[in-house]
Amino acid sequence: MTTHVFTAQDATGRQCRIQVTRSEGDAAHRDVEAAPRYVLEDGSHVRRIDNDTFQIIGTGAYVTRVAE
């Protein structure tokens, strides 16, 4: 399992940290569990829209990745 953390920002300028977790699955048996999981630092689930845009599931708010 690998983990990566990056910063994102909403329309008002509020920043948050998103953690991406990827499981190291067997390539011959790829399934939903092998898909990356996105979670805010407070545990809220996040859905990836495109490379830089994410939606917070609980609130519907969109955040954009901030270049580091």
Image (cartoon, rainbow, N blue to C red):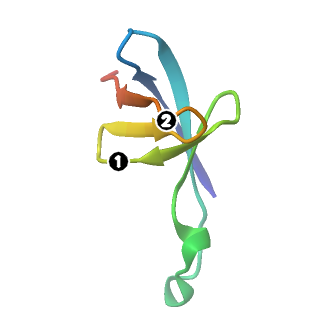
Q: Residue at x 35, y 47 (%)?
A: 49
Give the mark count: 2
> Badge 2, how many Cα within 10 Å: few under 14, some, many 20+?
few
Q: Residue at x 65, y 28 (%)?
A: 41
Q: Secondary structure at mark 2?
A: loop
Q: Position of residue 59 (x, y in %)?
A: 56, 32
Q: Position of residue 29 (x, y in %)?
A: 56, 88
> Badge 1, how many Cα within 10 Å: few under 14, some, many 20+?
few
Q: Residue furthest bottom?
A: 28
Mark 1 and mark 2 lie on one chain; the one further toward the N terminus is: 1
Quadrant containing the N terminus is: bottom right
Out of 65 and 14, give the one closest to the viewer.
Answer: 14
Name the amino acid type tagged 2: Gly
Q: Residue furthest top?
A: 13
For residue 49, the mark is 1
Q: Residue at x 61, y 37 (%)?
A: 58
Quadrant containing the C terminus is: top left
59 left or right, relative to 43: left
For residue 65, the mark is none
Name the amino acid type tagged 1: Ile
- 34 relative to 59, above or below: below
For residue 60, the mark is 2
20 left or right, relative to 51: right
- 28 relative to 66, above or below: below
37 left or right, relative to 11: right
Q: CA distance from mark 1 to mark 2?
A: 12 Å
Q: Residue furthest right?
A: 43
Q: Which-is-in-front pick, marks 1 and 2?
A: 2
Q: Residue at x 52, y 57 (%)?
A: 36
Quadrant of the rendered image containing residue 23: bottom right
Q: Position of residue 24 (x, y in %)?
A: 59, 68
Q: Position of residue 10 (x, y in %)?
A: 40, 19
